[in-house]
Structure formats: C-alpha cells, structure tokens
Image: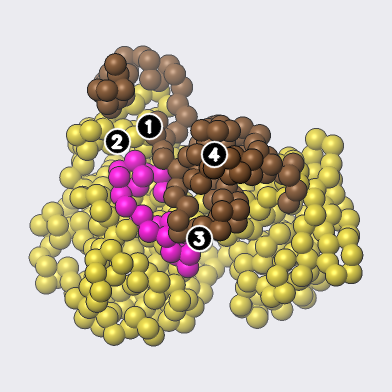
C-alpha cells in the first residue's frame, strides 16, 4: 500500500487522508468519519470498516479489540427519498423516522 | 404487520431457524434482501467437509434446494427484496421494500445476517475488474457470466483454492494464487494437489505491488524475492477473509465482543443464542465464523430456544434437542476447527460468566478439547 491507495471507495478517501486524521488525534472510525467523510457513502462503511480499523490499530498501537465499530444510524440501507417522503399506503414513514429523533436534537 | 418470529436473512441459518420454529406451529416471517432464499449456498457448486453429516455429500446449491423444500410445508411468510432499515422505539422493526417502509411487530427476532468478505487494498485496487472471490463466484455460478478470461487470486484460503478450480473449469486461465506469507492458509492437501495438477502456480512470499490499467485492470504487479513480476490479467479475485455482518445488531443495541478467531467483532450471546437485547436472537455466521456446520446448527439452536421461550416445547425436550445440536457441532469442529469451537465457548463464557456452558451436559468438559 502507498499513501494514494484508496481506502473508502465510495467517498474516495485514501490512506494518507486517514493517517492525517489519526495524526491529529482520531482514534476511532467515527472520529475519522467526522473528519473525512470516510464511510459515509452508499455502502455505509461495509467495505472500508475493516481496512480503517487495521490502519487505526497499526498507527495508534491499540489492539483491534480496542478499536470500536462505527455508530450506525437509521436508515441502514440507502432508500429513495420518495420512499421516506410519501405517505405510503399503509404507513407514514416520515412521521415514524422523526419519532426516533431525540427531543433535545429537535430543538 | 405482526408475526411470532421475524427472521432477518433467508440463508442457511435463517432457514434452519425457520424450520425449527415454523414446524412447531409458530407464525414465521423471513426478511431477505435479495430476490431468492438460500443465501450464499445458491452459487456454491462445491461440497464441504465441515457440513453437518447429512449434507456432506451435497454441493451448496443442492443443500439450499433441500432446505427450501424442507420449510415449504409450513407456510412461512417470505418477504424477498425486503431489507431491515431500522428499529422503532417500541421495538418494532422497520422494513423497506424500496417503495414502502413499514413496521413489523414480532414476539422474537432471529438475526441471521451472515458474513461479509473483507477487501484487500493495494494501489488501484478499485479499478473495474478487481472483485472479491465471492463476487467472481456469483458471476460464474449464479449469473452465468464470465468475469474475464485471465485472472489471478490474492489470498490462499480454501475458498480461494475452490474458486481457482471453478474458474479453471469454466475456461478461465488462472495465473496463480498469491500469498504474502510463507505458508498458505489452506490446510487441505487434496485441494493443493488438485490445484498443482491444473498447473496453477501457488506463489508464496509474494506481495501485491499495484494494479495497472486504463479504465479497467490490465496488469497486476507482484513481487517475490526473485523480484517484481507483471501479470497480464483482465480480472483479479481478492480473498481477504470474512467477518460477521453487524449492522442489524448495532441498530438493536446488542453488545459486541472482539474475537479474532470468530472473525472480529461478534454480538454477545448466551447458550440460547439470545443477545444482550431481550428477545433478539442470533444465528449463523453472525455468531462467529467457525465451520459450515455451525451456520446450520446455530440456526437450529436459536430456533429451538425461541420455541422454548414461546412455550412451544417444554424445557426438557428443548434441552435434549439443544444437546444433540451442540454435540453434532462438536463432532464436526473437533476435526476441522477446534480453535473455533473453543473460541465460541469462551465468547459465551465472556458474556454469561465462567463455566456457564456447563449447564449443557457434555459440552462443558469439551472446552479445551
């Protein structure tokens, strides 16, 4: 691998960008996600999760058992906005997704 | 929508769990994200030595056909092309078919999400034509499409060797199996002999430098102690191992533990395969990847546990059946993967406390072989 090797193919984040994030203090996948968008594309980190964890473990010397998996959020799969937005025949999905939002986040 | 048992995943583990639950009169719904049941078995034309006894002579897709036939009489509600996208606060699962999202209320949930392949990164590994070993097998066996004419495999598990054989059979030139370490992962000498007879080189101590090509892979550059070598290919297969698919467990707030031998992060579960989230069970490769037998037997075990918990069988009958399935798993794994067996019991102990598995007669004494 070299610095230009793509790690997150959805967002085209390379090895160097992940190492830079670790240099400024990233220790988890979520740290790197927030700094680089790594793992935020269509596959939602399915492909890069292991690769990123290995890099974190190698660069920080934390064993893999101390590199937590990313926090996943609803919806688990990319779905069409029309699926969410239509009052579907048997269920109003927008309402139910909004029901999951914590009160303090809504303000 | 309401159901007694909601099973996430219609592969071998989900179908095994479906059989145990539906055959005892429970109302069972299976959510499957592809358009067919059977999971990865469907494109597997090889047979497996680490299968439960009665499946050992059959190849993958025949086992899938058997299982599907076995559950057919019980009127299972099968939702193909449906995926789990979330969990509502009241515990109902959010299911989408790409048009609607709807909640499913289930007394028990069995998650049989399976395992995913791990990629092998190197410079330009994202070029078209570079794919996982599983993807190549899906193309040739399920979709009947040749991914190319000349290839090389990166990684040396039994799956890589099997795939090399299958690619050769359909007329693809396999230019080698590349392993960075000095030893190959596969232990089975028969399979190694077969590959050598086909004149497929096994390249140990060899690492991948990079891929090259305009818009598509054309060359793979590898390097051994004899120096770099440029291999002319039109596709490349990556075998980086597999790990459990966790998304559904994370959404359901199930706790995880890291077990390298089981495939990395694995949901915690007790002897009944119930996770830390009440009423949510786990089955198949997402319980840890140890043997093919474990996929079926953990499916049956979680199914029996759900039946017991919903009062469909009494605890005496349930523990007899569970002992049989555990015993069968031990019989297979002591031969093919004792390390995996031990790691699974340690995983259960780590969650339930020391010696907890001794409540199953005959299992406790076997923890260290």
Chain that is coloured yellow in the picture: B
Nearer to us: label 2 or label 3? 3
Nearer to us: label 4 or label 2? 4
What residue is shown with label 3?
A63
- Left or right of A91? Residue A21 is right
Q: Residue at x 60, y 56 (%)?
A: A58
First of labels 3, 4 by sequence position: 4
Residue A32 badge: 4
User: Could you give the CA–CA distance between mark 1 and mark 2, rounded to whole angstroms?
Assistant: 8 Å
What residue is shown with label 2?
B87
What residue is shown with label 1?
A74
> Do the residues at pointers 1 and 4 share their chain?
yes
Graded by Cα atoms within 10 Å as few (under 14), some (14 to 19) or many (20 or more), the crowding at tag 1 reads some
Q: Are marks 1 and 2 in contact (CB under 8 Å)?
A: yes
> Do the residues at pointers 4 and 2 share their chain?
no
- Asked if residue B277 can be seen in this view, the reply is yes
- Left or right of B24? Residue B211 is right
Q: Residue at x 46, y 22 (%)?
A: A80
First of labels 1, 4 by sequence position: 4
Residue B352 lies within the magenta run: no
Q: Are marks 3 and 1 in contact (CB under 8 Å)?
A: no
SS at mark 1 in the image: loop
């Amino acid at each position: 691998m070299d610095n230009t090797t793509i790690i997150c193919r959805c967002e085209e984040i390379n090895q160097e960008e992940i190492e830079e994030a670790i240099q400024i203090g990233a220790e988890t996948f979520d740290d790197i996600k927030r700094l680089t968008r790594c793992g935020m594309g269509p596959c939602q980190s399915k492909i890069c999760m292991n690769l990123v964890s290995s890099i974190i473990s190698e660069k920080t010397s934390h064993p893999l058992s101390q590199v937590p998996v990313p926090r996943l959020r609803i919806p688990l799969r990319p779905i069409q906005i029309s699926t969410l937005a239509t009052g579907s025949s048997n269920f109003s999905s927008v309402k139910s997704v909004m029901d999951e939002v914590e009160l303090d986040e809504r303000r | 929508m309401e159901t007694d048992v909601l099973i996430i995943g219609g592969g071998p583990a989900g179908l095994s769990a479906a059989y145990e639950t539906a055959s005892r009169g429970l109302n069972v719904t299976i959510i499957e994200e592809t358009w067919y049941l059977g999971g990865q078995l469907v494109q597997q034309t090889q047979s497996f030595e680490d299968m439960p006894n009665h499946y050992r002579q059959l190849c993958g897709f025949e086992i899938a056909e058997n299982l599907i036939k076995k559950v057919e009489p019980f009127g299972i509600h099968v939702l193909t092309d449906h995926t789990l996208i979330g969990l509502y606060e009241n515990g109902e699962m959010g299911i989408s078919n790409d048009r609607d999202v709807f909640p499913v209320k289930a007394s028990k949930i069995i998650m049989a999400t399976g395992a995913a392949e791990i990629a092998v990164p190197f410079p330009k590994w994202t070029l078209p034509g570079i794919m996982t070993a599983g993807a190549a097998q899906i193309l040739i066996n399920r979709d009947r499409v040749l991914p190319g004419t000349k290839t090389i495999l990166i990684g040396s598990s039994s799956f890589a060797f099997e795939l090399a054989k299958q690619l050769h059979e359909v007329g693809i030139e396999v230019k080698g199996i590349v392993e960075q370490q000095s030893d190959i992962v596969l232990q089975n000498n028969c399979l190694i002999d077969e590959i050598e007879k086909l004149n497929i080189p096994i390249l140990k101590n060899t690492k991948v430098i990079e891929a090259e090509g305009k818009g598509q892979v054309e060359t793979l550059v590898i390097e051994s102690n004899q120096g770099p070598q440029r291999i002319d290919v039109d596709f490349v297969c990556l075998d980086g191992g597999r790990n459990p698919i966790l998304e559904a467990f994370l959404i359901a707030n199930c706790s995880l533990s890291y077990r390298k031998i089981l495939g990395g992060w694995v949901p915690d579960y007790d002897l009944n395969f119930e996770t830390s989230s009440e009423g949510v069970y786990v089955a198949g490769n997402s319980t840890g990847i140890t043997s093919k037998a474990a996929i079926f037997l953990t499916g049956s075990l979680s199914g029996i546990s759900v039946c017991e918990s919903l009062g469909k069988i009494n605890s005496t009958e349930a523990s007899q059946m569970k002992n049989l399935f555990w015993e069968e798993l031990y019989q297979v794994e002591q031969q093919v993967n004792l390390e995996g067996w031990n790691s699974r019991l340690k995983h259960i102990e780590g969650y339930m406390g020391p010696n907890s598995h001794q409540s199953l007669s005959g299992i406790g004494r076997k923890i260290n072989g």
